[in-house]
Amino acid sequence: MKNLLKKIILLILFVNISHSQVTTTVDQVFVNNQTTVNLCNTINLASNQSVNLVFYYTLTKPSSQAVGDGTVRILLKNTSSSFPTEKVAMSIPASFWSPTQYQSTISCNIGANEIQVSGSTIFVEYTSAGNVKYQSCENPIIKNAIPTFTLSQSTVSVGCNDLNPRTFSVTAANIPAGANVVYQWSALGWSGTSNTSSITLAPSSPASASILLVQTI
């Protein structure tokens, strides 16, 4: 009885070790067929609203290990703790292995609205016929933060015959390095001009006073 138990345990260990030796490797990623990202380095969408990613990957297994028909997927994680979202899947018949490797490409489009400024990842995963998953390392995927502008004194109460000047200012955030920010103020019912981030205006017609701020980069 003890010998039978030992054989069963050894058989289970052998199966687990055999399965663990399949590897999925992303050799490089082409971003819009222009930028090449090697291995598991960061993929940067920059200010693009959408990019096409082509993953060049390699599947490797021991020569003694048989594999059935499997599937390769691209999976995207919005955050490190989020559940992966499948972007695309491709069937990999067992006959494609030659004999211990299979190399190919798989591609998908990624929208900027699908990821965070930082903290998102993307990777390739191979699932065998026995539903065993073999994941590549994760490529961090980032984008530029969207510029924002906050107006100080967004609402001002002006009483009748109150012509005292008011100062308005705007604070810019997430401005890309080297960008040129131009401030253009347009006021109706106020007098005053400025091309900087603040403006001092005097109301000339309080009943219809309004301000429009236009920012361009």
Image (spheres, rainbow, N blue to C red):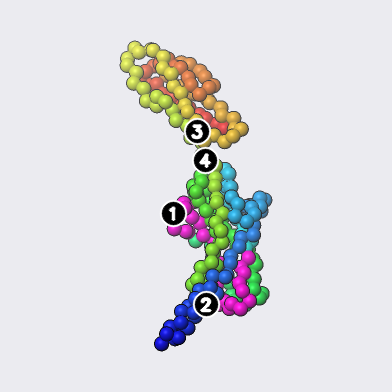
Instruction: Give the residue type that dot 4 points to.
Output: Ala
Residue 145 circle label: 4
Mark 2 to mark 1 CA distance (whole Å): 32 Å
Answer with the quarter of the image where residue 161 lies. top left
Work out whether mark 2 precedes mark 4 in sequence or the reverse, and give the earlier one. Answer: 2
Please give the name of the residue rendered at 52% of the width and 40% of the height, measured from the top-left corner: 145
Residue 173 circle label: 3
**Nearer to the camera, 158 or 84:** 84
Work out whether mark 2 precedes mark 1 in sequence or the reverse, and give the earlier one. Answer: 2
Please give the name of the residue rendered at 56% of the width and 54% of the height, measured from the top-left corner: 139
Q: Which residues are magenta?
A: 58-85
Do tag 3 and tag 4 residues touch (Cβ < 8 Å)?
yes
Where's residue 163, x and y in %? 38, 12
**Nearer to the camera, 15 or 158:** 15
Q: Is residue 180 magenta?
A: no
Please give the name of the residue rendered at 54% of the width and 63% of the height, measured from the top-left corner: 135
Q: Which residue is mark 1?
A: 81
Instruction: Give the residue type that dot 3 points to.
Output: Ala
Answer with the quarter of the image where residue 124 lies. bottom right
Q: Which residue is mark 2?
A: 14
Mark 3 to mark 1 CA distance (whole Å): 27 Å
Mark 4 to mark 1 CA distance (whole Å): 21 Å
Mark 2 to mark 3 CA distance (whole Å): 57 Å
Which secondary structure lies at badge 3? strand
Which secondary structure lies at badge 4? loop
Q: Is residue 62 magenta?
A: yes
In the image: residue 110, left or right of residue 102 = left
Instruction: Give the residue type that dot 1 points to.
Output: Ser
Work out whether mark 3 precedes mark 1 in sequence or the reverse, and give the earlier one. Answer: 1
